[in-house]
Image (cartoon, rainbow, N blue to C red):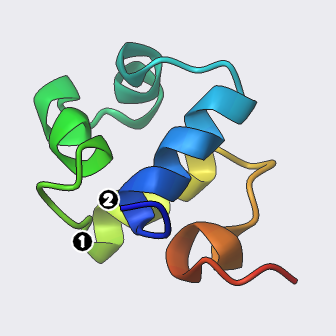
């Protein structure tokens, strides 16, 4: 899905040159769980979303969550 959360998270990872493994290490989130989110199999709970946003500080939170740019 080109406009869903999984797509935007993939774009954010590409933009920051970060792998899923690196994101897992930075956030403490299990790599398999991150993989499920990136593939669109799961949507992140609030606590996971918070960790993702902390690990990706240069990514606009509104865009990542909703797809709406400032």
Q: Quadrant of the C terminus?
A: bottom right
Which residue: 42% across, 65% down? 5
User: Which quarter of the figure has residue 63?
Assistant: bottom right
Residue 62 at x, y percent in the picture: 67, 79
Residue at which label 1 appears: 45
Contact (CB < 8 A) between labels 1 and 2?
yes
Residue 51 at x, y percent in the picture: 44, 53
Residue 36 numbered tag: none
> In the rendered view, would you say 42 is above or below 34?
below
> In the rendered view, would you say 14 is above or below 37?
above
Residue 13 at x, y percent in the picture: 58, 33
Residue at which label 2 appears: 48
Question: Which of the pair 1/40 is nearer the observer?
Answer: 1
Which residue: 38% across, 23% down? 20
Q: CA distance from mark 1 to mark 2?
A: 5 Å
Question: Which of the pair 25/36 is nearer the observer?
Answer: 36
Q: Quadrant of the N terminus?
A: bottom left
Which residue: 39% across, 20% down? 25
């Amino acid at each position: 899905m080109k406009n869903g959360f999984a797509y935007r998270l993939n774009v954010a990872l590409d933009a920051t040159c970060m792998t899923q493994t690196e994101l897992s290490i930075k956030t403490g989130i299990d790599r398999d769980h991150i993989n499920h989110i990136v593939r669109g199999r799961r949507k992140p709970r609030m606590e996971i979303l918070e960790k993702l946003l902390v690990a990706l500080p240069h990514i606009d939170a509104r865009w990542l969550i909703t797809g709406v740019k400032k």
